[in-house]
Image: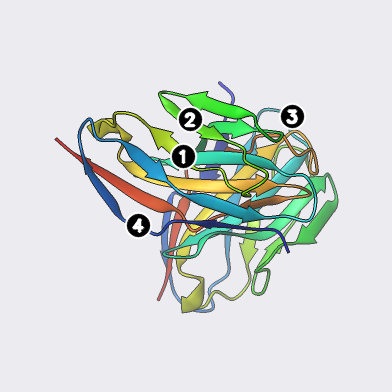
Amino acid sequence: GDSVTQMEGPVTLSEEAFLTINCTYTATGYPSLFWYVQYPGEGLQLLLKATKADDKGSNKGFEATYRKETTSFHLEKGSVQVSDSAVYFCALSVNDMRFGAGTRLTVKP
Amino acid sequence: EAQVTQNPRYLITVTGKKLTVTCSQNMNHEYMSWYRQDPGLGLRQIYYSMNVEVTDKGDVPEGYKVSRKEKRNFPLILESPSPNQTSLYFCASSWTSGRISNEQFFGPGTRLTVL
């Protein structure tokens, strides 16, 4: 079935460091791909999405490119801030939404 | 303000005592869903509803019931809670199930502890 695999955390970075969180997927159809973010004590909220191959989603300095050839949707940010500390979920949707296990990011000053 | 609300936010109960977690959305979404979040397992879908009076099982439906009598509400019922249902629960909604680009909007979560 459809599934998402994302890198295990936790990930700890210093402020202004470069961030990559890997995400790969398996899908029978043509999925849309998403990154959701969960701040402490809150529900998930959409960070960015891409609906077809080679699309790049971007928001708040985060980017991810839909790579069909490698079935990947890696999340990147050039310079993280303490306020980016959260849990990040990769997800795909064909007929329904499937989430990865989540990656906890902690950014230290 | 467009939102999904859940109540209660925190609940501690005992094994076997029936409980209901309410979920309501004000965006006129057709699709609603319940997830549970457990460490290392991400979000797993419990039940979902494509519209009023239409519900279906997700990946982990055992021990749960739902109903969808109105478009805005989608309560989650635990008839006889057990400790393995201790978890963080999220309700979500979106415009239509199956539309691959539709974002889901999440409630703030309900942390349930079953003793």
In x, y percent, where is residue A43?
47, 42
- The reply to the same-chain question for discs 2 and 3 is no
Amino acid type for the residue under numbered disc 1:
Leu
Which of the chains bears the disc numbered 2? Answer: A
Instruction: Please rate how many residues cluster around mark 2, counting C-alpha atoms within 10 Å: few if below 14, some from 14 to 19, many from 20.
Output: many
Farthest left residue? A109
Q: Which residue is mark 4?
A: A9
Specify whether disc 4 shares its chain with disc 3.
no
Say which element carries label 4: loop
Tell me the subunit letter for badge 4.
Answer: A
- In which quadrant of the rendered image does the N terminus of chain A lie? bottom right
- Badge 1 marks a residue whose secondary structure is strand
Q: Where A46 sits versus B8, above or below? A: above
Q: Amino acid at mark 4?
A: Gly
Whether the residues at callouts 4 and 1 have beta carbons within 8 Å, the answer is no
Mark 4 or 1: in front is 1
Q: Position of residue B92 (x, y in %)?
A: 62, 43
In which quadrant will I find the C terminus of chain A?
top left
CA neighbours of label 3 inside 10 A, class few (<14), some (14 to 19), many (20+): few
Please report whichever mark, 4 or 1, sits nearer to the chain's N-terminal start.
4
The disc label shown at residue B28, or none: 3
Whichever of labels 4 and 2 marks the residue nearer the N terminus, that label is 4
Q: In 3D space, how far apart are the residues under numbered discs 4 and 3 (Cα atoms)?
A: 36 Å
What's the CA distance linking mark 4 and mark 1?
Answer: 14 Å
Residue A63 circle label: 2
Q: What whole-number distance in Å separates the C-alpha atoms at marks 4 and 2?
A: 19 Å
